[in-house]
Amino acid sequence: MSASYNIGVDIGGTFTDCVAVDTDGNISLGKAPSTPPDFSRGVIDAVSDAARHVGLGSVQELLRATRIFFHACTVGENTLIVQEGAKTALVTTKGFADAVLMTRGTTTIGLTEYEGFHEAMLRKPDPLVPRQLIKELTERVDYKGAVLVPLDIEETRRVVAGLAGSGVESIAISLLWSIANSEHEEAVEALIRESYPDIFVTRSSELTPFVGEYERGITTILNAYVGPKISAYLQALRDALREKELSSEPLIMQAYGGVLGIDATCKSAVSTIESGPASGVVGTQFVGKLIGEENILATDMGGTTFKVSVIRNGALERDYAPVFMRYQLLTPKIWVESIGAGGGSIAWIDPDSNLLKVGPQGAGAVPGPVCYGVGGEEPTVSDADCVLGYLNPDYFLGGRMHLDKEAAAKAIQEKIADPLGMSLLEAASGIYRIANSHMTDLIRKATVERGYDPRIFTLFAYGGAAAVHAGRYAAELGVHQVVCPPTGSVHGATGLIASDVVYEYGTSDNLVVPADTQRVNHNFADLIERANRDLHGAGFETDQVQIVRSLDMRYRYQVHELNTSFAPGTEELTDADLDQLYKDFDEAYEQSYGKGSAYREAGREIVNFRVIAVGNLPDPIIRRVTTSAGNEGSAVKAKRDVYFEASNGFVETAIYDFDLIAPDAEVHGPAVIESPVTTIVVNPGDRATVDELRNIRLFIGG
Amino acid sequence: MNSTTHAVDPVTFEILSHRLHQIAKEMGTTLERVGGTVNTTQQHDYMASLYRPNGDILATGESMPWHVACGGFTVKRILERFEDREGVNPGDVFLLNDPYISAIHQSDLYMVTPHHYEGQLISWSASFVHVMDIGAMSPGGNSPNATEICQEGVRIPGVKLVDGGTFRQDLFEMIIGMTRQPMMVGLDLKSELAGNNVAKQRMQEMVAQYGWELIDAVSQEMIRHSEQVLRRRISEIPDGEWNAETSITTGPDSASRFIMTLRKRGDTLIFDYTGSDKQARTGINLPYHATFGSCYDAVIATMAYDLPKNHGLFLPIEVIAEPGSVVHVEYPAPVSLNTTSGGAAAKYVARSAMLEMLAGVDKWRSEVMGLNSGSRLVRTAGTNQRGVAFVSGLAQGAVSGDGARATRDGNDSGGGGFMSVPNVEWAERNFPLLFLYRRHLKDGGGPGKYRGGAGAELALTSHDSPEGKVRAVAYGVDGFGNVGRGSAGGYPGLRSLLVLAEGTNLKGQMAEGKYPQEMSELAGPKRLLPYCDFEINDGDVLFYRLASGGGYGDPLERDPEKVFNDVQCEIVSTESAKDMYGVVIDDSLESVNQNATAKLRGKMKAERLKGAHESTGK
């Protein structure tokens, strides 16, 4: 029988990565430049590269043998950055046309604090819909869903006709309190679909039925704005892949960490935004499960940003009110915190204080770090990594790219060392140390804010640059073990092939605890029915399906909402189940927000009902390597001078070839391990081993 | 201050100062998380800072500058009061809210924690949160009818809430028991304890890791650096004097004047409020440290936004305010309304003079912007639709408009900075209210080449209230005498107003499918609300206009297409387009009439010249 494959393709800012795993668990990687605006070419190129590594003659041969094709795309992000979304209109309730322009009033969302204090520069994010295309309808529903003023259908007809006449391609419908009574929104949607079937329609009560007219409105608008582009891209990709003989339906990554078919994705396209970083976290969760690690700090250091996410007791953490490009959204995503501290972050001197600073400005993919030799002139973290001997100029990305070490040294010397009166080494190590301290501070903030002690976690380091720095920020945090997955910079694509099909449903109903159990069951029943319908529609049998119900709750007078889950299943909930959940909520609240933070006497309230429906896809098998491919001695491919903070200078250091390190070998720092997709720095006093899945395990302090 | 500079290498300095800064931020985050109240999380109405052993501010995270300045006095007052008496010992935590000593008004409860390491005082943390009630005459604290401080709630000059590690439960219960919301106030206090403790733990860890000498050297260097840069920036500006003044209503027929002269001398800024009125019998009066904070705020927002906010930024600023005046209150004058009334006025004059000074300097001209004159505010109380008692602010201040910049329009509904506004749905779900609209005010933003940001306006009524009414307090700045200053020939923005229409036929109209959107559509008597307690009964409608920002530059120089766009966006009326901007829009409302516009603008300029000649007698 010929081999069959699961394939994951992840589009990044510079490269499109492909991972192909066969039924025996052999992994092959592929890489190709990303090709905006037509990203599907880059996808096919990356698959083609993987086909070569697998040893197949063509893309067709690989795709013909592919069972499941997973994909994470950045079309949504790209559409927003180049501002080329659909011509979008909003219809809303009379008296509230300005709600999405008002935002929540604040002008500092998504800014650094220094930017936030600079009043003359403050402004709001672009509303994506000009005020002229926001139309009011005469109608009003109250918080209970009671109709106070009925919808004026004739007026609605005129308004919609006017919008269609002005060339609107996409309409967002977001009426006040549609979450309590969606009749008016549904009537508006029906009217548009009937008269103008070509207009893309997004209805807030379907997309994101949660309280808050600003966040619901802007989320609906965002979907309306990027939806047509994403739909067009995914349909073109489906056609391109079919033409190359892929027989199955591609599955598309969502930012909350699961995949959906193309049709389902097109409806809630906003959910693909930031799905790339989500893939990396899902991949981390998957590897963690294989190696028995349940509490993980997932750190991803790429070219422009450093991202951290937390896996606790094996579970991903969701963010139900994320901020993206300064928009405050109501669409679930995996909680990921990030700062501008990547390999491309620029080192500079603050003219006022004469102090060395790193980031948050980055050189991006173009012009990039100086050492890339594609036009960058400002010294970056990668340039420091290069000067300090961590990066091998002749073996960056497995030799795919040559690094110009001299140019990097010159830039640091002239722009940092000379003006500050430092040596080149002091300047380069200063950049390295400051970048590490920023990452340490972010991880500390991220864990502390969630009530966690970073020392109980194992840290995962992936993305091109992470493993150069992870040993240092782990040590600073008191973390004992760092795991560097062998897929390094293409770890996101690994996450894809480990994904399940996941649907998210929710509804808003404000109930005082103790809540009426019947009403709770009734609210969930609607969501479960939709879940079953969608999962069965996607081809899942009942035994492949897992349904988890949860509630967002809060203490009255306090604003923090916290999501707490019931045990998986769909049986009717009993009073005892609810009582248990209330107790779990109390515990989780104090765990998250600190001892004594729960104002129980105020009473609890249920805010939202949520259902997560999972269609289980078989986990890929990853081949375990137990036999020795070499030994420690023979894995050393070279020696070179590398800087280490502990030695405060260069030390002659053994350079290991990742592929030749034996499973039972121990590498003692100082050492550098090089693979085609990443570089791992083992600091003095630390120890590294390779596990059966070819992860490098770094033990801080030996 | 010319302290000895220890040799700290720039990389270590950057790393440790970043870390100290993070500690102050973590304090703030802890306050927000543990307290979880609207005031703290959405109104950003708190302060959380780190101090050197002598009480100098070291790092302040994201706390609002004027709060930081007030907090800058707090630790020193505790030191003065306790050092030679009961002592400042490991495990102590102090509580105070006396406005004559350190707080702005009693609603701000300060918690002050000394940090010791091996018996040595290494640093302090101090925080305050604005609590939901403090036992004053009116629920929520802001008391329009108070004429002396004793009517304004609990006043604490400084007590040890935790004494050598022992929590004083008796004292705690006594204090929260004097408020209308003991549980809520208790939670706020717990959040401060948690925030201060986090900072204490982090500082102790840092000293353990790096040693006290290095931390202290970095701390001194941070302060020295901020001071040095600010002094240098000030000294680059030519010496001079700039004046500003305003007045606000304090009663049915009384008002208080705020007069200020800014003197720039060398590397120092002197804000002199001499000549301002005597303290009022209404609680608009500011303690000296709050007046200092108003000036500090004006400096930070314009020429020090990028500098680490610490004691170093205090040093180049001098504030003169006569004791017994509205800007330096003394016993027994009341203060409970002051943050949003006297505070708005003092900040306004300080900022006006600063901007006037900066407008003459190339380097800083881009910081010049129009201002708004502060907003009215409303607190509501009663029983909600679920039968639960509540006290809460409407918290709409964030959707006032801010001023036009030298290069672009002001932000519509964007005057709040870090503050945010609740969603209408959130308000309607939690309180027995129904909003008829919340929208940008037409013709609110001051006309100019760049238009001032429009404030929001809204109308609301009580809805599903079990008591048939909502009790309320009207406060915030009233009767501002110099509305939303414009710049460089720009016009002022409209000021904030509260109007109550009583006994309207709203319900009847809605039953007929009508949905009133203008005050004129509702019959019934209407009255302007001064500082007062009032009620929103069934059928009453409260109209609430937030302040709009001033314009920048001559409105006759505004691009007619921009004016046309404003008309389409319902921010400017066709009448104002014509009268204020000289822009004539075609009757079809589809384009600018270029010829008529050129003609009208020519005529308006000619009239101005004529007016000028007449006034100079030529």
Image (cartoon, coloured by chain):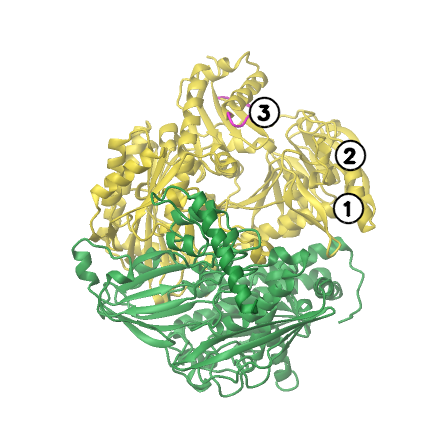
Chain colours: A yellow, B green
Magenta residues, start to end: A23-38
Circles 3 and 1 in contact, beta carbons < 8 Å: no
In this view, B609 is above or below B328: above
Do tags 3 and 1 sit on the same chain? Answer: yes
Residue B36 on image: x %, y %: 44, 62
* Quarter of image, res B455: bottom left
Q: Which mark is residue A416?
A: 1
| Above/below status of A54 relative to A259 | above
In the image, taking residue B65 as reference, residue A153 lies left or right, namely left
Quick one: quadrant of the N terminus of chain B?
A: bottom right
The residue located at (47%, 59%) in the rendering is: B446
Category of crowding for the residue at label 1, using alpha-carbon neighbours closer than 10 angstroms: few (below 14), some (14–19), many (at least 20): many
Check disc 2 and give the amino acid type. Ala
Residue identified by numbered label 2? A407
Mark closer to the chain start, 3 or 1 = 3
Name the element at disc 2: helix
Q: Disc 3 residue type?
A: Lys
**Residue A37 magenta-drawn?**
yes
Point out the tag, 3 or 2, that comes first from the N-terminus. 3
The amino acid type, in three-letter code, at marker 1 is Ile
Q: Earlier in the sequence, mark 1 or mark 2?
A: 2
Q: Secondary structure at mark 1?
A: helix
Disc 2 crowd, CA 10 A, few/some/many (<14, 14-19, 20+): many
Q: Camera-side residue: B241 or A48?
A: B241
Quadrant assignment for the C terminus of chain B: bottom right
Chain identifier of the residue bearing label 3 in the image: A
Q: Which mark is residue A31?
A: 3
